[in-house]
Image: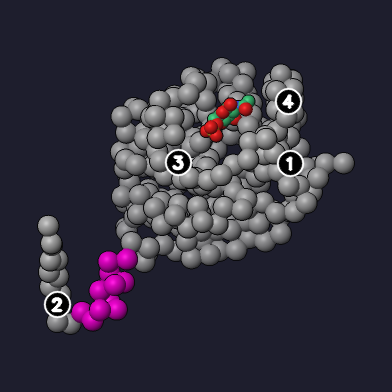
Amino acid sequence: MKVAVLVTTSSKMDPETLHKTLNPYRNVRAGGKWSPAGNRSSSSEKVAILVTYKDREEHLKIFLRHMHPFLQRQGLDYAIYVIEQHGEEQKFCKGLLYNVGFTEALKDDPTYNCFIFHDVDLIPEDVRNLYTCRKSPFHLSVAIDKFEYKLPYVTLFGGVSALTKAHYELLNGYSNLYCGWGGEDDDMTRRMFKHKLRLSRPDKDFARYKMLAHSRNRTTDDNPARYYLLSTGVSRADTDGLTDLQAANYSVTSVTHKELYTHILVNITKRR
Ligand code: NGS
């Protein structure tokens, strides 16, 4: 089929104005912040989306392009923070980065009361999957195409998840000790169970995601220490996380308010 799209515009509207009017990113404020006109947010929450990454520029572009229109359709008052790791630690320290993102976002705006922890390679498919917090920790990435849209195991909290500010503080954030692939999210689940918090999820029919393709080298990226860390994690939960972040091996290199996100560049040095 050959389709002709006919667009009529008011004679007063030049092509540049038309482009701006149709551009879904036009009202995003510096640092990737947006709220509905007239402050008519669909929820009373102020949501900070925390995205941690390292060497994934191509995924970040796709993610940002998708997420702004998605979150705006949900009518949320939100901002996107991208926490990027550099420095001599070659492995990705996701838990530490989330703690830094949480702390820096609150320095930027102390009124956030809901935090979404988001892998950069997961793209939500259905706008009914609301990016808000619930009474209990909320795991949003229930059905991922890579897992044939089935939850791999019932205690999984990784991928995309939501915690209120109060819960994140109660749980002492993530552990700072996991560097390399795996385990930091399972450690978080154990923290939740320790505090008798129930893990909740949206309906799998719409909590669906596409995972962007990448070539992860499991053998070099995996954290071989993760099973030991997990087996001892609960006893450390009150001392390893937000409470000892000051002493952790990182520094914030820069915080930049870019057009579509706030970029927090974090230098992580190797533990001696
Ligand atoms: C588990 C990992 C989790 C991870 C989950 C899904 O095995 O950290 O797989 O990973 N736990 C351990 O390694 C202890 S995924 O395939 O989506 O990258 O989140």
Residue 171 position by quadrant: top right
- Report whether 46 appears left or right of 220: left
Q: Quadrant of the N terminus?
A: bottom left
Q: Earlier in the sequence, mark 2 or mark 3?
A: 2
In the image shown, does 271 or 98 lie closer to the viewer?
Answer: 271
Q: Label 1 belongs to which residue?
A: 245
Disc 3 secondary structure class: strand
Element type at mark 2: loop
Image quadrant, ligand 1: top right
Q: Earlier in the sequence, mark 3 or mark 1?
A: 3
> Residue 229 got which mark?
4
Residue occupying the point 33% across, 61% down: 24
> Viewer-nearest of labels 3 and 4?
3
Residue 160 position, x and y percent, is 48, 37
Total marks in image: 4
Find residue 10 and name its label. Answer: 2
Badge 3 residue CB within 8 Å of ligand 1: yes
Q: Secondary structure at mark 4?
A: helix
Q: Nearer the viewer, residue 242 or 204?
A: 204
> Which picture quadrant has residue 255?
bottom right
Marks 4/2: CA–CA distance = 64 Å
Quarter holding the C terminus is: top right
Q: Of helix, strand and loop, which one carries label 1?
A: helix
Q: Residue at x 35, y 54 (%)?
A: 69
Q: Which amino acid is tagged 1?
A: Leu
